[in-house]
Image (cartoon, rainbow, N blue to C red):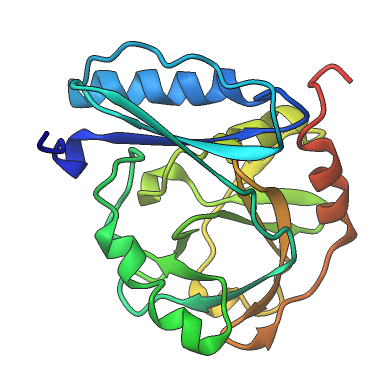
Amino acid sequence: MKSPMPARTLLETIRVREGVAPLWPLHMERLTRSALALGITFEPPPRPEGGEDRVCRFEVSSKEVLMSEREVGSLAPLALVSALTPHRGYPHKVAARAWLEAERLPIRTRSADDALFFDPEGYLVEAAVWAIAWWDRETLVFPPLSLGGLPSVARARLGETVRGGFAEGRLHRDEVPGKALVACNAARGVVAVAALDEDAVPANQRTIAIAKRFWNRVDA
């Protein structure tokens, strides 16, 4: 059977932790919103539960819903490298990700984990597989979604769990050195960024605190 066009296929990568998918409502909210915007009709997939700690990947199109599973992966601090090309805009998590993945290929030779994208004017947007924030004193700051980054489920989760929520702001690539960076996604949660372009990134103990709370119940 011929596969659907990638641009018409939505992706959701969902963590199953201790037998439950704690971020399921946030995933379904984003999936429904993107499907409506792109004209995709689908039957809601069953909520994954039970079994080992893992990541479930759903590929959703008007034709079918496919599911696969993989291991969670490392939770160690990340080493990032700056992408060589500007961010193109990725408002929906679609399977047409070749331009994002292309920037990740060279990082293997540089012992890095992901590529960090900036917009054409040099403002931080996101990494290829991680939403990126930074600490401004005691405030967690994310780039505004108007720059074209993905409405990350992990970002939405931090809006629920970080005391006082988070702020939005623009950070130019020239302003990044010296900032404590935070990476998050819905598969692995919150991790610190240890290096960018082989230069050390400052640590911030608040990153450890929000990582611990990420998977907790909102009312816990």
Q: Which residue is found at the position 38% from the left and 51% from the top? A: 147
Q: Which residue is found at the position 39% from the left and 12% from the top? A: 44
Q: Quadrant of residue 186?
A: top right
Q: Which residue is found at the position 24% from the left and 26% from the top? A: 61
Q: Relative to 65, is 41 above or below?
A: above
Query: Front-most of 89 and 64?
Result: 64
Q: Is residue 54 left or right of residue 212?
A: left
**Residue 120, visible in the rendered structure:** no
Q: Which quadrant: the N terminus? A: top left
Q: Is residue 135 left or right of residue 30?
A: right
Q: Is residue 35 left or right of residue 80?
A: left
Q: Relative to 10, is 184 above or below?
A: below
Query: Front-most of 97 and 174?
Result: 97
Query: Front-most of 9 and 79?
Result: 9
Q: Quadrant of residue 65?
A: top left
**Residue 139, visible in the rendered structure:** yes
Q: Which residue extends farthest top?
A: 43
Instruction: Residue 155: give x, y in percent of width and height.
Output: 59, 40
Instruction: Residue 42: give x, y in percent of width and height.
Output: 28, 15
Instruction: Residue 97: give x, y in percent of width and height.
Output: 29, 54
Q: Which residue is found at the position 65% from the left and 25% from the top? A: 21
Q: Relative to 88, is 144 above or below?
A: above
Q: Is residue 98 left or right of residue 181?
A: left
